[in-house]
Amino acid sequence: MTHTPVKLTFEQYLEYDDGTDNRYELCNGELIVMPPESEENGWIADWLRDEFSQFIKRRLVKVNRYELQVLGKRQNRFPDLVVLRSEHLELTKKRQTITLDMSPPQLVVEVVSPYRNQKDDNYKRDYIEKREQYERRGIPEYWIIDPQAQSVTVLLLVNGKYQATEFNGNQRIVSRTFPELKLTAAQILQAG
């Protein structure tokens, strides 16, 4: 864990460069090193990128590279997969960060890392903390892929609040943002 000597603002964080390839989350002004993703999470995100790229410009579908500025104790997140809007390509040429003054991405996907129970940090991070932050950020669709529970939860923003639908097995995923998508929960979960 890296601690900065002084509390950073988000603007200072955007200018921070320690000469490493480390990714950081800014938490209460302190830099927290992000661990690398698990192989299973990476496979699922890569597979989904390829599926989305069949009907969306591949340049708009990003795996583990874009960060989102969000509101809360943790001020940025690195989703496993994000589907950008065309305008983001120009706005993020200098740094792959979607800030609060930009439109939210079309879709954010998180693959839940293994957890012991619902009080575990990995569970709380994706199911509770990120859900609240992405909802407040106005992201129209958020998917939680949970290999352990063998489920895909699709959250749609309706009147400022997420409405969740859980998909299992051979149930076809229903996406309001991408209705042309023809995937089942099992296909996504087997990708890992």
Image: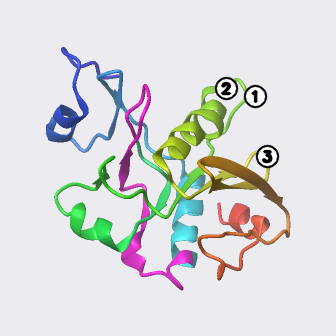
The amino acid pointed to by label 2 is Asp
Q: Which residue is mark 2?
A: 120
Most extreme residue toward the front, as rendered?
Answer: 159
Q: Which residue is mark 3?
A: 149
Residue 172 found in image quarter: bottom right
**Residue 49 placed where, x, y %?**
51, 71
Say which residue appears at 60% left-offset and 27% top-offset.
Answer: 121
The amino acid pointed to by label 3 is Ala
**Residue 18 placed where, x, y %?**
15, 35
- Is residue 144 toward the left or the right of residue 62 in the image? right
Q: Which residue is mark 1?
A: 117
Q: CA distance from mark 3 to mark 2?
A: 14 Å
Report the magenta residues as a range.
52-76
- Around disc 3, counting alpha carbons within 10 Å, would you say few (fewer than 14), some (14 to 19), or many (20 or more)? few
Residue 170 found in image quarter: bottom right
**Residue 124 placed where, x, y %?**
63, 31
Report the colour scheme. Answer: rainbow
